Image (cartoon, helix red, strand yellow):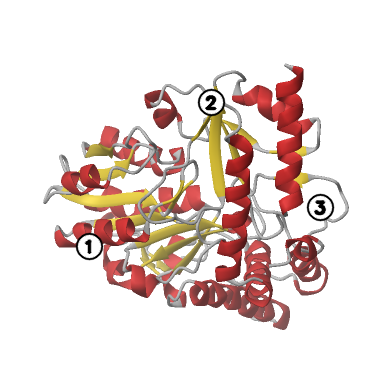
Protein backbone atom coordinates (compact mmCIF):
# COMPACT_ATOMS: atom_id res chain seq x y z
CA UNK A 1 0.00 0.00 0.00
CA UNK A 2 1.37 3.39 -1.03
CA UNK A 3 0.46 5.44 2.05
CA UNK A 4 2.35 8.47 0.82
CA UNK A 5 0.29 8.58 -2.37
CA UNK A 6 -2.94 8.03 -0.41
CA UNK A 7 -2.00 10.89 1.89
CA UNK A 8 -2.16 13.23 -1.12
CA UNK A 9 -5.91 12.57 -1.31
CA UNK A 10 -6.40 14.20 2.10
CA UNK A 11 -6.20 18.02 2.01
CA UNK A 12 -5.42 18.46 5.69
CA UNK A 13 -2.46 16.09 5.48
CA UNK A 14 -1.21 17.08 2.06
CA UNK A 15 2.06 18.99 2.48
CA UNK A 16 0.94 20.29 5.89
CA UNK A 17 3.69 18.75 7.98
CA UNK A 18 1.14 17.34 10.42
CA UNK A 19 1.99 13.86 11.70
CA UNK A 20 -1.51 12.62 12.40
CA UNK A 21 -1.53 9.59 14.71
CA UNK A 22 -5.03 9.91 16.14
CA UNK A 23 -7.23 8.24 13.55
CA UNK A 24 -8.98 6.18 16.24
CA UNK A 25 -10.46 9.45 17.50
CA UNK A 26 -11.47 10.71 14.05
CA UNK A 27 -10.31 9.96 10.54
CA UNK A 28 -9.19 12.61 8.10
CA UNK A 29 -11.35 13.33 5.05
CA UNK A 30 -10.35 12.74 1.44
CA UNK A 31 -11.00 15.43 -1.12
CA UNK A 32 -13.81 13.43 -2.73
CA UNK A 33 -15.81 13.43 0.50
CA UNK A 34 -15.43 17.18 0.97
CA UNK A 35 -16.35 17.75 -2.67
CA UNK A 36 -19.41 15.48 -2.47
CA UNK A 37 -20.85 17.45 0.44
CA UNK A 38 -20.01 20.81 -1.13
CA UNK A 39 -21.49 19.82 -4.48
CA UNK A 40 -24.69 18.62 -2.85
CA UNK A 41 -25.16 21.87 -0.96
CA UNK A 42 -24.31 23.94 -4.04
CA UNK A 43 -26.38 22.12 -6.65
CA UNK A 44 -28.66 19.43 -5.18
CA UNK A 45 -29.83 20.55 -1.74
CA UNK A 46 -33.46 19.66 -1.13
CA UNK A 47 -35.52 18.06 1.65
CA UNK A 48 -35.61 14.27 1.70
CA UNK A 49 -38.88 12.33 2.06
CA UNK A 50 -40.78 15.63 2.22
CA UNK A 51 -41.28 17.01 -1.27
CA UNK A 52 -42.86 15.94 -4.54
CA UNK A 53 -40.94 18.38 -6.69
CA UNK A 54 -37.90 17.28 -8.68
CA UNK A 55 -35.16 18.68 -6.43
CA UNK A 56 -36.64 17.01 -3.36
CA UNK A 57 -37.13 13.72 -5.21
CA UNK A 58 -33.53 13.78 -6.38
CA UNK A 59 -32.28 14.46 -2.84
CA UNK A 60 -34.38 11.59 -1.51
CA UNK A 61 -32.96 9.23 -4.11
CA UNK A 62 -29.41 10.29 -3.30
CA UNK A 63 -30.05 9.86 0.42
CA UNK A 64 -31.48 6.37 -0.03
CA UNK A 65 -28.57 5.46 -2.31
CA UNK A 66 -26.30 6.26 0.64
CA UNK A 67 -28.31 3.87 2.81
CA UNK A 68 -27.88 1.12 0.22
CA UNK A 69 -24.13 1.81 0.04
CA UNK A 70 -23.85 1.33 3.80
CA UNK A 71 -25.90 -1.85 3.59
CA UNK A 72 -23.67 -3.21 0.83
CA UNK A 73 -20.56 -2.32 2.83
CA UNK A 74 -21.57 -4.60 5.71
CA UNK A 75 -23.64 -7.12 3.71
CA UNK A 76 -27.00 -6.14 5.12
CA UNK A 77 -30.35 -5.02 3.71
CA UNK A 78 -31.15 -1.30 3.35
CA UNK A 79 -34.15 -1.59 5.67
CA UNK A 80 -31.76 -2.79 8.39
CA UNK A 81 -29.73 0.46 8.23
CA UNK A 82 -30.79 3.29 10.53
CA UNK A 83 -28.98 6.61 10.20
CA UNK A 84 -28.02 8.19 13.53
CA UNK A 85 -25.61 10.92 14.59
CA UNK A 86 -22.83 8.45 15.49
CA UNK A 87 -21.90 5.35 17.46
CA UNK A 88 -22.98 6.93 20.74
CA UNK A 89 -26.40 7.79 19.36
CA UNK A 90 -26.74 4.32 17.83
CA UNK A 91 -26.08 2.56 21.14
CA UNK A 92 -28.37 4.94 23.03
CA UNK A 93 -31.04 4.31 20.40
CA UNK A 94 -30.99 0.56 20.86
CA UNK A 95 -30.93 0.97 24.64
CA UNK A 96 -34.06 3.14 24.45
CA UNK A 97 -35.91 1.55 21.54
CA UNK A 98 -35.22 -2.10 22.37
CA UNK A 99 -33.66 -2.74 25.77
CA UNK A 100 -35.80 -0.38 27.83
CA UNK A 101 -38.96 -2.01 26.46
CA UNK A 102 -37.73 -5.60 26.53
CA UNK A 103 -35.45 -6.22 29.50
CA UNK A 104 -36.91 -6.81 32.94
CA UNK A 105 -35.71 -6.52 36.51
CA UNK A 106 -32.78 -8.84 37.27
CA UNK A 107 -32.11 -9.60 33.59
CA UNK A 108 -28.36 -9.51 33.01
CA UNK A 109 -26.20 -7.55 30.55
CA UNK A 110 -22.62 -8.80 30.06
CA UNK A 111 -19.84 -6.54 28.80
CA UNK A 112 -16.07 -6.03 29.27
CA UNK A 113 -14.97 -3.52 31.89
CA UNK A 114 -12.74 -1.94 29.22
CA UNK A 115 -15.62 -0.71 27.05
CA UNK A 116 -15.86 2.89 25.87
CA UNK A 117 -18.20 5.01 28.01
CA UNK A 118 -20.60 5.09 25.05
CA UNK A 119 -21.10 1.35 25.40
CA UNK A 120 -21.23 1.40 29.17
CA UNK A 121 -23.20 4.41 30.39
CA UNK A 122 -26.48 3.55 28.55
CA UNK A 123 -26.48 0.12 30.18
CA UNK A 124 -25.56 1.49 33.61
CA UNK A 125 -28.45 3.92 33.33
CA UNK A 126 -30.74 1.04 32.35
CA UNK A 127 -29.61 -0.79 35.48
CA UNK A 128 -30.43 2.29 37.56
CA UNK A 129 -33.86 2.86 36.05
CA UNK A 130 -35.04 -0.66 35.19
CA UNK A 131 -33.27 -2.87 37.70
CA UNK A 132 -31.27 -4.92 35.21
CA UNK A 133 -27.94 -6.30 36.40
CA UNK A 134 -24.63 -5.39 34.76
CA UNK A 135 -22.02 -8.16 34.73
CA UNK A 136 -18.51 -6.97 33.91
CA UNK A 137 -15.93 -9.18 32.21
CA UNK A 138 -12.35 -8.91 33.47
CA UNK A 139 -9.10 -8.37 31.64
CA UNK A 140 -6.01 -10.39 32.45
CA UNK A 141 -2.98 -8.57 33.96
CA UNK A 142 -1.35 -8.57 30.51
CA UNK A 143 -4.31 -6.67 28.98
CA UNK A 144 -6.02 -9.66 27.32
CA UNK A 145 -9.76 -10.08 27.25
CA UNK A 146 -10.40 -12.89 29.75
CA UNK A 147 -12.31 -15.21 27.45
CA UNK A 148 -12.87 -17.84 30.14
CA UNK A 149 -14.39 -15.23 32.44
CA UNK A 150 -16.50 -13.91 29.54
CA UNK A 151 -17.96 -17.29 28.67
CA UNK A 152 -18.55 -18.19 32.32
CA UNK A 153 -20.57 -15.01 32.87
CA UNK A 154 -22.93 -15.67 29.95
CA UNK A 155 -25.73 -17.65 31.57
CA UNK A 156 -29.46 -18.27 30.99
CA UNK A 157 -30.06 -15.00 32.89
CA UNK A 158 -28.09 -13.10 30.24
CA UNK A 159 -30.34 -11.15 27.89
CA UNK A 160 -27.74 -8.94 26.24
CA UNK A 161 -24.04 -9.32 25.43
CA UNK A 162 -22.22 -6.26 24.16
CA UNK A 163 -18.62 -5.44 23.34
CA UNK A 164 -16.43 -3.58 20.88
CA UNK A 165 -15.12 -5.62 17.96
CA UNK A 166 -11.92 -3.62 18.33
CA UNK A 167 -11.01 -2.17 21.70
CA UNK A 168 -10.18 1.53 21.38
CA UNK A 169 -7.37 0.97 23.90
CA UNK A 170 -6.11 -2.58 23.40
CA UNK A 171 -6.79 -3.20 19.72
CA UNK A 172 -8.44 -6.17 18.04
CA UNK A 173 -9.62 -9.30 19.77
CA UNK A 174 -8.86 -12.69 18.19
CA UNK A 175 -11.53 -13.72 15.71
CA UNK A 176 -12.03 -17.01 17.53
CA UNK A 177 -12.90 -15.07 20.70
CA UNK A 178 -15.58 -13.14 18.84
CA UNK A 179 -17.07 -16.27 17.31
CA UNK A 180 -17.21 -18.20 20.58
CA UNK A 181 -18.75 -15.25 22.47
CA UNK A 182 -21.46 -14.82 19.83
CA UNK A 183 -22.16 -18.55 19.78
CA UNK A 184 -22.44 -18.70 23.57
CA UNK A 185 -24.78 -15.71 23.61
CA UNK A 186 -26.98 -17.33 20.99
CA UNK A 187 -27.08 -20.57 22.96
CA UNK A 188 -28.69 -18.82 25.94
CA UNK A 189 -30.98 -16.68 23.76
CA UNK A 190 -29.21 -13.38 24.45
CA UNK A 191 -29.12 -10.50 21.98
CA UNK A 192 -25.78 -9.12 20.79
CA UNK A 193 -24.83 -5.45 20.38
CA UNK A 194 -21.46 -4.80 18.74
CA UNK A 195 -19.57 -1.51 18.80
CA UNK A 196 -17.77 -1.39 15.45
CA UNK A 197 -16.52 2.20 15.69
CA UNK A 198 -12.86 1.14 15.58
CA UNK A 199 -13.42 -1.74 13.16
CA UNK A 200 -15.43 -0.70 10.14
CA UNK A 201 -12.70 1.46 8.62
CA UNK A 202 -10.05 -1.23 8.97
CA UNK A 203 -11.67 -4.58 8.22
CA UNK A 204 -14.46 -6.13 6.19
CA UNK A 205 -17.62 -6.66 8.22
CA UNK A 206 -20.28 -9.12 7.12
CA UNK A 207 -23.56 -9.13 9.04
CA UNK A 208 -24.57 -12.47 7.57
CA UNK A 209 -21.41 -14.12 8.89
CA UNK A 210 -21.37 -12.35 12.25
CA UNK A 211 -25.03 -13.06 12.89
CA UNK A 212 -25.47 -10.28 15.45
CA UNK A 213 -28.62 -8.41 16.42
CA UNK A 214 -27.35 -4.84 16.49
CA UNK A 215 -24.17 -3.08 15.35
CA UNK A 216 -23.11 0.55 15.65
CA UNK A 217 -20.47 2.72 14.00
CA UNK A 218 -19.67 6.34 13.12
CA UNK A 219 -19.05 7.90 9.73
CA UNK A 220 -16.26 10.20 10.87
CA UNK A 221 -13.93 7.27 11.65
CA UNK A 222 -14.61 5.92 8.15
CA UNK A 223 -13.23 8.96 6.25
CA UNK A 224 -16.77 10.35 6.31
CA UNK A 225 -18.19 13.50 7.88
CA UNK A 226 -19.13 14.06 11.49
CA UNK A 227 -22.76 13.96 12.55
CA UNK A 228 -23.63 10.72 10.76
CA UNK A 229 -23.65 7.23 12.22
CA UNK A 230 -25.17 3.85 11.54
CA UNK A 231 -27.24 1.47 13.60
CA UNK A 232 -27.67 -1.96 12.03
CA UNK A 233 -30.80 -3.72 13.26
CA UNK A 234 -31.17 -7.35 12.22
CA UNK A 235 -34.60 -7.64 10.63
CA UNK A 236 -35.51 -10.53 12.94
CA UNK A 237 -35.73 -7.92 15.72
CA UNK A 238 -37.99 -5.44 13.90
CA UNK A 239 -41.11 -6.45 15.81
CA UNK A 240 -39.36 -5.76 19.11
CA UNK A 241 -38.34 -2.18 18.25
CA UNK A 242 -40.40 0.47 20.00
CA UNK A 243 -40.72 4.12 19.05
CA UNK A 244 -38.85 6.28 21.56
CA UNK A 245 -38.25 9.59 19.76
CA UNK A 246 -41.05 11.17 17.81
CA UNK A 247 -41.38 13.77 15.09
CA UNK A 248 -41.68 14.22 11.37
CA UNK A 249 -40.71 11.57 8.89
CA UNK A 250 -41.44 8.50 11.02
CA UNK A 251 -45.24 8.59 11.19
CA UNK A 252 -47.91 7.54 8.71
CA UNK A 253 -50.98 8.81 10.54
CA UNK A 254 -51.54 10.66 13.82
CA UNK A 255 -54.45 9.76 16.10
CA UNK A 256 -55.85 12.88 17.77
CA UNK A 257 -57.93 10.90 20.26
CA UNK A 258 -54.77 9.27 21.61
CA UNK A 259 -56.23 8.64 25.08
CA UNK A 260 -58.56 6.05 23.60
CA UNK A 261 -55.86 4.36 21.55
CA UNK A 262 -52.92 2.08 22.30
CA UNK A 263 -50.58 4.52 20.53
CA UNK A 264 -50.88 8.13 19.37
CA UNK A 265 -49.97 7.33 15.77
CA UNK A 266 -49.43 4.70 13.13
CA UNK A 267 -45.69 4.49 12.70
CA UNK A 268 -43.73 3.84 9.54
CA UNK A 269 -41.84 0.60 9.09
CA UNK A 270 -38.15 0.22 9.81
CA UNK A 271 -35.79 1.94 9.43
CA UNK A 272 -37.85 5.15 9.28
CA UNK A 273 -39.59 4.70 12.63
CA UNK A 274 -36.19 5.33 14.26
CA UNK A 275 -35.37 8.38 12.12
CA UNK A 276 -37.55 11.13 13.57
CA UNK A 277 -36.97 14.63 12.24
CA UNK A 278 -34.96 15.86 9.29
CA UNK A 279 -32.11 13.39 8.77
CA UNK A 280 -28.48 14.36 8.27
CA UNK A 281 -28.83 13.84 4.54
CA UNK A 282 -25.79 15.86 3.42
CA UNK A 283 -23.66 13.90 5.89
CA UNK A 284 -25.10 10.63 4.59
CA UNK A 285 -24.07 11.65 1.09
CA UNK A 286 -20.58 12.39 2.39
CA UNK A 287 -20.52 8.95 4.00
CA UNK A 288 -21.51 7.40 0.67
CA UNK A 289 -18.55 9.17 -0.95
CA UNK A 290 -16.25 7.85 1.78
CA UNK A 291 -17.43 4.29 1.20
CA UNK A 292 -16.89 4.69 -2.54
CA UNK A 293 -13.39 6.03 -1.88
CA UNK A 294 -12.52 3.01 0.27
CA UNK A 295 -13.81 0.59 -2.33
CA UNK A 296 -11.89 2.33 -5.12
CA UNK A 297 -8.65 2.94 -3.24
CA UNK A 298 -8.09 0.59 -0.33
CA UNK A 299 -7.76 -3.17 -0.03
CA UNK A 300 -8.57 -4.34 3.49
CA UNK A 301 -5.94 -7.06 3.19
CA UNK A 302 -3.22 -4.61 2.17
CA UNK A 303 -4.41 -2.14 4.79
CA UNK A 304 -4.01 -4.78 7.51
CA UNK A 305 -0.50 -5.60 6.30
CA UNK A 306 0.39 -1.90 6.21
CA UNK A 307 -0.95 -1.19 9.70
CA UNK A 308 0.71 -4.30 11.12
CA UNK A 309 4.06 -3.09 9.80
CA UNK A 310 3.52 0.36 11.32
CA UNK A 311 2.52 -0.99 14.75
CA UNK A 312 5.38 -3.50 14.77
CA UNK A 313 7.84 -0.71 14.06
CA UNK A 314 6.24 1.47 16.72
CA UNK A 315 6.62 -1.28 19.32
CA UNK A 316 10.32 -1.56 18.51
CA UNK A 317 10.75 2.16 19.07
CA UNK A 318 9.00 1.97 22.45
CA UNK A 319 10.67 -1.14 23.83
CA UNK A 320 14.03 0.61 24.27
CA UNK A 321 12.58 2.59 27.18
CA UNK A 322 12.51 0.54 30.38
CA UNK A 323 9.84 2.73 32.00
CA UNK A 324 7.32 2.40 29.15
CA UNK A 325 4.62 -0.26 29.43
CA UNK A 326 3.06 -1.25 26.12
CA UNK A 327 -0.64 -1.98 26.61
CA UNK A 328 -0.98 -4.36 23.70
CA UNK A 329 -2.01 -7.91 24.56
CA UNK A 330 -0.13 -10.77 22.93
CA UNK A 331 -2.41 -13.66 22.01
CA UNK A 332 -1.40 -17.13 20.87
CA UNK A 333 -1.95 -16.17 17.25
CA UNK A 334 -0.98 -12.76 15.83
CA UNK A 335 -3.86 -10.28 15.93
CA UNK A 336 -4.00 -7.31 13.58
CA UNK A 337 -4.41 -3.88 15.13
CA UNK A 338 -4.28 -0.32 13.87
CA UNK A 339 -3.53 1.21 17.28
CA UNK A 340 -1.26 0.85 20.27
CA UNK A 341 -1.52 2.32 23.76
CA UNK A 342 1.23 2.75 26.32
CA UNK A 343 2.11 4.58 29.50
CA UNK A 344 5.34 5.78 31.02
CA UNK A 345 6.28 5.49 34.67
CA UNK A 346 8.47 8.55 34.20
CA UNK A 347 6.33 10.94 32.16
CA UNK A 348 2.59 11.57 32.48
CA UNK A 349 0.63 10.80 29.32
CA UNK A 350 -0.51 14.40 29.01
CA UNK A 351 3.09 15.61 29.19
CA UNK A 352 4.09 13.19 26.43
CA UNK A 353 1.25 14.36 24.18
CA UNK A 354 2.05 18.02 24.85
CA UNK A 355 5.72 17.41 24.05
CA UNK A 356 4.86 15.65 20.79
CA UNK A 357 2.53 18.48 19.84
CA UNK A 358 5.55 20.80 19.70
CA UNK A 359 6.75 18.65 16.80
CA UNK A 360 3.31 18.82 15.09
CA UNK A 361 2.59 15.22 16.10
CA UNK A 362 -0.97 14.38 17.14
CA UNK A 363 -1.66 11.48 19.54
CA UNK A 364 -4.40 10.83 22.10
CA UNK A 365 -3.64 11.02 25.82
CA UNK A 366 -5.89 10.48 28.84
CA UNK A 367 -8.31 7.77 29.87
CA UNK A 368 -9.82 7.55 26.36
CA UNK A 369 -13.40 7.57 27.68
CA UNK A 370 -12.59 4.38 29.57
CA UNK A 371 -12.12 5.43 33.17
CA UNK A 372 -13.08 2.09 34.80
CA UNK A 373 -10.32 0.06 33.15
CA UNK A 374 -7.69 2.71 33.84
CA UNK A 375 -8.79 2.75 37.46
CA UNK A 376 -8.64 -1.03 37.74
CA UNK A 377 -5.18 -1.10 36.20
CA UNK A 378 -4.12 1.80 38.45
CA UNK A 379 -3.00 3.81 35.42
CA UNK A 380 -3.71 7.56 35.67
CA UNK A 381 -3.62 8.00 31.89
CA UNK A 382 -2.17 6.45 28.76
CA UNK A 383 -1.03 7.50 25.30
CA UNK A 384 -2.64 6.03 22.19
CA UNK A 385 -1.05 6.02 18.74
CA UNK A 386 -3.46 5.08 15.96
CA UNK A 387 -2.90 4.67 12.23
CA UNK A 388 -4.78 4.46 8.97
CA UNK A 389 -4.12 4.11 5.26
CA UNK A 390 -2.49 7.56 5.05
CA UNK A 391 -0.04 6.86 7.91
CA UNK A 392 3.52 6.41 6.66
CA UNK A 393 6.57 4.82 8.23
CA UNK A 394 8.05 8.32 8.24
CA UNK A 395 5.21 9.37 10.56
CA UNK A 396 6.13 6.62 13.02
CA UNK A 397 9.80 7.55 12.81
CA UNK A 398 8.94 11.20 13.47
CA UNK A 399 7.09 10.09 16.59
CA UNK A 400 10.13 8.06 17.66
CA UNK A 401 12.57 10.93 17.13
CA UNK A 402 10.39 13.33 19.12
CA UNK A 403 10.08 10.82 21.95
CA UNK A 404 13.87 10.44 21.96
CA UNK A 405 14.16 14.20 22.38
CA UNK A 406 11.84 14.07 25.37
CA UNK A 407 13.92 11.43 27.11
CA UNK A 408 17.18 13.15 26.29
CA UNK A 409 15.99 16.51 27.61
CA UNK A 410 14.17 15.43 30.77
Residue 53 is left or right of residue 107, and the answer is right
Relative vertical location of residue 56 with respect to residue 386 in this rendering, above or below: below
Numbered disc in front, either 3 or 2: 2
Does label 3 or label 2 sit earlier along the sequence?
A: 3
Foreground pick, 122 / 101:
122
Report if the CB atoms under discs 3 and 1 are less than 8 Å apart.
no
Within 10 Å of disc 2 (Cα), the crowding (few <14, some 14-19, many 20+) is many
Whether residue 338 is visible to the viewer of this picture, yes or no, is yes
Q: Residue furthest front?
A: 320
Where is residue 228? Give x, y as percent.
Answer: 59, 57
Where is residue 248? Give x, y as percent.
Answer: 52, 62
Q: Which residue is mark 3?
A: 12
Name the image quarter holding residue 183: bottom left
Q: Which residue is mark 1?
A: 183
Name the image quarter holding residue 221: bottom right
Q: Residue furthest bottom?
A: 54
Does label 3 or label 1 sit earlier along the sequence?
A: 3
Does label 1 or label 2 sit earlier along the sequence?
A: 1
Within 10 Å of disc 3 (Cα), the crowding (few <14, some 14-19, many 20+) is some
At numbered mark 3, what does the secondary structure look like: helix, strand or loop? loop
Amino acid sequence: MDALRIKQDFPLLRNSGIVYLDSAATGQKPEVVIDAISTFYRTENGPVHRGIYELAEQATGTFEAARKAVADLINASPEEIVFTSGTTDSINTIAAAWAAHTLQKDDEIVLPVSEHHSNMLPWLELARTHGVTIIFVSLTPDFKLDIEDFLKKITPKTKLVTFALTSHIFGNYPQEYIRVIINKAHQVGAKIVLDAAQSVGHMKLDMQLLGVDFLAFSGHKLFGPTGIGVLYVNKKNFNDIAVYRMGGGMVQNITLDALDKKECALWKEMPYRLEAGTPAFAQAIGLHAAIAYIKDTISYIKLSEHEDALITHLKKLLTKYDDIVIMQPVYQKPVHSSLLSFYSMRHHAHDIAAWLSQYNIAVRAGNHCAQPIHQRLKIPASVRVSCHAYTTMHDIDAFGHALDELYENK
